[in-house]
Image: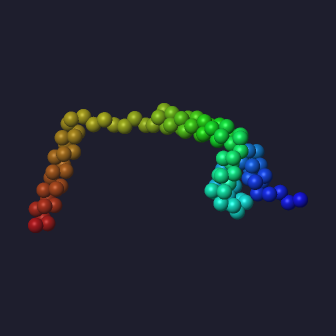
């Protein structure tokens, strides 16, 4: 007996951890059909919430890791800003002088 697409989709989702989009490409059924079927299953909401929580924990980990490993940026003082401004004015004044 050949298994129907619903049992294959449920196995791929609950046991192998595939996403609905991955299941759709494997089975050849539309994402909408698979999603409608999963929404009728009683344990789908719990599995979806578990995956959402796991993904949230992963995002928090990477966010905190990035924050810890981020290099400190140079905070310019007033003098360096003034010097940069004067240089920019000189360049712009030369450009407007020679372009006219």
Residue 65 appears in the figure: no
Which quadrant of the structure image shows residue 6? bottom right
Residue 63 vertical placement versus 96 (above, below): above
Q: Position of residue 30 (x, y in %)?
A: 65, 60
Relative height, residue 96 to residue 69 (above, below): below
Q: Position of residue 25 (x, y in %)?
A: 68, 60
Colour option used:
rainbow
**Residue 33 in the image: x percent, y percent?**
66, 57
Give the quarter of the figure containing the N terminus. bottom right
Q: Farthest right residue? A: 1
Nearest to the observer: residue 97 or residue 4: 4
Observer-nearest residue: 22 or 4?
A: 4
In front of the other: 92 or 21? 21
Question: Which residue occupies the extreme front position in the image?
Answer: 40
84 relative to 97 in the view: left or right: right
The residue sitting at 13% across, 61% down in the picture is: 96
Q: Is residue 75 above or below residue 15?
A: above
| In-front residue for pair 23/82 | 23
Report the residue at 16% width, 61% height from top: 95
Residue at horizontal 71%, vertical 40%?
Answer: 43
Left/right placement of residue 8 relative to residue 31 reads right
**Image location (x, y in percent) of residue 49:** 63, 38
At x 71% / y 59%, what residue is drawn?
26
In the picture, the quarter occupied by the C terminus is: bottom left
| Image-based side of 100 in relation to 58, left or right | left
Where is residue 58, by image quadrant?
top right
The reply to whether residue 55 is in sight is yes
Residue lying furthest bottom:
100
């Amino acid at each position: 007996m050949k298994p129907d697409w619903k049992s294959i989709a449920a196995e791929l989702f609950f046991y192998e951890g595939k996403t609905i989009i991955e299941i759709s490409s494997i089975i050849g059924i539309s994402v909408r059909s698979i999603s409608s079927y999963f929404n009728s299953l009683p344990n789908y909401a719990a599995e979806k919430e578990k995956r959402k929580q796991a993904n949230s924990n992963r995002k928090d980990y990477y966010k905190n890791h990035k924050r810890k490993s981020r290099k400190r940026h140079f905070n310019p003082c007033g003098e360096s800003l003034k010097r940069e401004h004067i240089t920019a004015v000189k360049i712009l004044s030369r450009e407007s002088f020679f372009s006219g």
